[in-house]
Image (cartoon, rainbow, N blue to C red):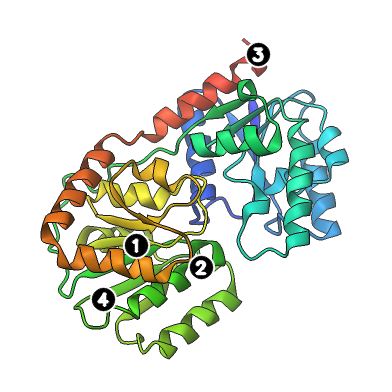
């Protein structure tokens, strides 16, 4: 984009339906809409585990930017770059860090340690770090040694696209909706094990999300059959926004057994639809829910099943958490609010 004031680099297809990519795309759109031209720099999708060719291509695209142009770079790339390459960017670098890479579930211990050490070193070369939650900001201070003055919290925004739409009846049997990438960190296996303990109750379940890990998808399907849930649980994969919206609007409960979240955009989406939520006390989930749901320890299928059983059986509790979820949803920020925070961070680096 000619005449751009700032560049925003992120890996993969900008229209990918993952929380981090949706966040980045909406910030770019918000900055442009407010009169701040942004050059989108598409990087190879292989980050954070690129091959040598993709690393060279990434550096070539970043070094091709005009001298001195401020660069916002997604943490999925920034955290995994060689520190010497980060130091050689020679421009103001602002990092959009959704969560530290070394906290991803399923990593070998040596890989996790390498990512944490590399990200710690790389962050020393960033002018500023933008994070989606106070939890991530505090974690960077406590575990990565980043000064509070270099961190800004910019929660994701939310659209109210379903407002004014006809109210859909809740499905019968009640629908337990799960939305999240098909990867180990999202804990869909825990949801399945919990549902396997509730076969005496009436319910149906749908798991929606882009497949990031094909092996994990096969594990989920095997587990679904081993628990004899194939007639009650649909693993739908990635859906259009319209189809996903239909599920939110007719669901009864939102369930996400995540092992870690830097924010959890889908939790906010559930609040917009007044859904009681069952999730795990991990990462920023408690901050995001703000009392509008039931939290259990991560990787505890028994506790998750108990929480779901309570919501399916106790109407007073269900109604109370639905009301709290609705109130939390009305207080969620909009994407204009997120873009405004980015403009404030960028102000010192942009020409007047």
**Alpha carbon of mark 4 to alpha carbon of mark 1: how far?**
12 Å
Say which mark, if any, is on residue 222. none
Say which mark, if any, is on residue 255. 1
| Closer-to-camera residue (292/239) | 292
Q: Are marks 4 and 3 in contact (CB under 8 Å)?
A: no
The residue that appears at 44% across and 90% down in the rendered structure is: 226
Name the spot of residue 280 as percent of width and height, x first. 42, 56
Question: Which mark lies nearer to you, 1 or 2?
Answer: 1
Name the spot of residue 99 as percent of width and height, x first. 59, 45
Is residue 3 at all visible to an observer of this figure? no
**Alpha carbon of mark 2 to alpha carbon of mark 3: how far?**
42 Å
| Closer-to-camera residue (331/91) | 331
The residue that appears at 25% across and 37% down in the rendered structure is: 330
Q: Is residue 38 left or right of residue 189?
A: right
The residue that appears at 24% across and 51% down in the rendered structure is: 273
Q: Do the residues labelled 1 and 2 touch (CB within 8 Å)?
A: no
Name the spot of residue 260 as percent of width and height, x first. 52, 54
Disc 1 or 2, which lies upstream in sequence? 2
Q: In this view, does 71 lie to the left or right of 249?
A: right
Q: Are marks 2 and 3 in contact (CB under 8 Å)?
A: no
Q: Pointer 2: what residue?
A: 182
Mark 3: secondary structure:
loop
Disc 2 or 3, which lies upstream in sequence? 2
Say which mark, if any, is on residue 204. 4
Disc 4 or 2, which lies upstream in sequence? 2
Question: Which mark lies nearer to you, 1 or 3?
Answer: 1
Report the quarter where the C terminus lies.
Answer: top right
Q: Pointer 3: what residue?
A: 351
């Amino acid at each position: 984009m000619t005449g751009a004031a700032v560049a925003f680099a992120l890996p993969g297809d900008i229209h990918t339906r993952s929380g981090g990519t949706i966040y980045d795309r909406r910030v770019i759109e918000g900055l442009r809409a407010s009169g701040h031209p942004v050059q989108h720099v598409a990087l190879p999708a292989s980050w954070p585990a690129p091959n040598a060719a993709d690393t060279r291509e990434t550096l070539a695209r970043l070094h091709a930017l005009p001298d001195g142009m401020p660069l916002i770079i997604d943490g999925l790339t920034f955290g995994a770059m060689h520190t010497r390459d980060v130091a050689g960017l020679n421009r103001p670098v602002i990092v959009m860090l959704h969560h530290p890479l070394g906290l991803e579930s399923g990593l070998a211990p040596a890989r996790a340690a390498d990512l944490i050490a590399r990200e710690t070193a790389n962050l020393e070369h960033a002018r500023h770090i933008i994070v989606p939650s106070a939890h991530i900001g505090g974690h960077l201070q406590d575990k990565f040694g980043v000064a509070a003055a270099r961190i800004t919290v910019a929660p994701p925004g939310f659209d109210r696209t379903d407002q004014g739409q006809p109210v859909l009846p809740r499905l019968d049997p009640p629908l337990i909706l799960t939305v999240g990438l098909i990867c180990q960190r999202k804990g869909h296996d825990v949801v399945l094990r919990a549902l396997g303990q509730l076969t005496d109750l009436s319910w149906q379940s749908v798991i929606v999300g882009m497949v990031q890990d094909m092996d994990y998808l096969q594990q989920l399907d095997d587990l679904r059959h081993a628990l004899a849930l194939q007639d009650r649980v649909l693993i739908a994969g990635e859906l259009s926004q319209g189809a996903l919206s239909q599920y939110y609007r007719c669901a009864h409960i939102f369930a996400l057994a995540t092992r870690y979240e830097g924010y959890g955009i889908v939790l906010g989406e559930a609040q917009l639809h007044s859904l009681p939520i069952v999730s795990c006390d991990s990462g920023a989930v408690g901050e995001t829910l703000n009392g509008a749901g039931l939290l259990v320890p991560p990787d505890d299928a028994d506790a998750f099943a108990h929480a779901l059983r309570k919501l399916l059986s106790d109407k007073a509790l269900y109604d109370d958490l639905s009301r709290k979820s609705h109130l939390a949803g009305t207080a969620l920020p909009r994407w204009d609010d997120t873009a405004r925070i980015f403009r404030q961070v960028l102000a010192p680096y942009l020409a007047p």
